[in-house]
Amino acid sequence: MPFSRQPVWIYALLAGVAALAIMFGVLMLTGTRDSGPIVRTSGQAQIGGPFTLVNQDGETVTDADFRGKAMLIYFGFTYCPDICPFSLQTMDAALAQLSAADRARVQPILISVDPRRDTSEALATYVQSDAFPDGLVGLTGTPEQIAQVTQEYRVIYRETEEGQEDDSYLVDHTSFIYLMDFEGEFVTVFSHGHTPQAIADTLQDFLDQERSS
């Protein structure tokens, strides 16, 4: 069989995916007290960016509405049976270890990767769970808006084939908690393997650095 030469863009795409995987591998080594102080990336990681979405009250909000607070952002969906609730419970347990004053400086956010089912009304009920952080903001939007914000945060998501007929499908997605600073700039990410204590330690270091700067 003759050799079929692949278009140049194929190799560029593969290189980009490999670079992203390496970047997240490096990021997974950061974010705990044992790994040393937080190092600001000043956008070098190219994670995060402007967004316009709708909150659980049906109000249009942008990233600028959260300026002045650090953001803990998780991408998930309300029909998620396990990983999403676990991640939000981990976020809650970490925030509970901060003082009331420091806790008030952090805004927990859930951005849906399931805009078809996650309406504002669905999010309004979901974010009020006692197992999740107090003041958790749920954000959704049009499929196009969700595609844009997930691209900004390098989140990959895909509806499963099974369950499409009766809307019982699941959504496979990247599962990280993103820490963004008071100006919406990327600081670090927390993976499924980070404990509430490790996240709390990193948050405390970050807030202390901000206070002294």
Image (cartoon, rainbow, N blue to C red):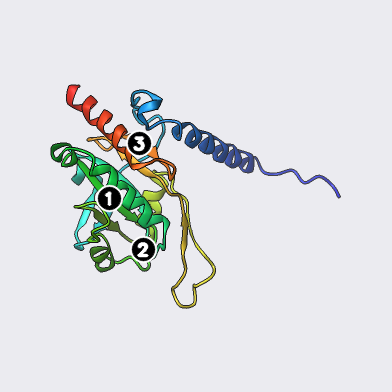
Q: Secondary structure at mark 3?
A: helix
Pick the front one: 192 or 25? 192
Residue 213 quadrant = top left
Amino acid type of the residue tagged 2 in the rendering: Pro
In this rendering, position of residue 199 left or right of residue 56: right
Q: Secondary structure at mark 2?
A: loop
Q: Which mark is residue 131?
A: none
In this rendering, position of residue 69 left or right of residue 118: left
- Dot 2 alpha-carbon crowd within 10 angstroms: few under 14, some 14 to 19, many 20 or more: some
Considering only order in the chain, which callout, 1 or 2, is on the residue closer to the N terminus? 1
Residue highlighted by disc 3 = 198
User: Residue 37, position in %: x, y?
Assistant: 34, 23
Residue 111 quadrant = bottom left
Amino acid type of the residue tagged 1 in the rendering: Ile
The residue mark sitting in front, 2 or 1, is 1
Residue highlighted by disc 1 = 109
Amino acid type of the residue tagged 3 in the rendering: Ala
- Dot 3 alpha-carbon crowd within 10 angstroms: few under 14, some 14 to 19, many 20 or more: some
Residue plotted at (44% across, 74% down): 167
Q: Secondary structure at mark 1?
A: strand
Residue plotted at (21% across, 38% down): 98
In this rendering, position of residue 21 left or right of residue 117: right
Considering only order in the chain, which callout, 3 or 1, is on the residue closer to the N terminus? 1
- The answer to whether residue 163 is above or below residue 56 is below
User: Residue 81, position in %: x, y?
Assistant: 41, 63
The residue mark sitting in front, 1 or 3, is 3
Residue highlighted by disc 2 = 115
Pick the front one: 131 or 80? 131
Pick the front one: 99 or 166? 99
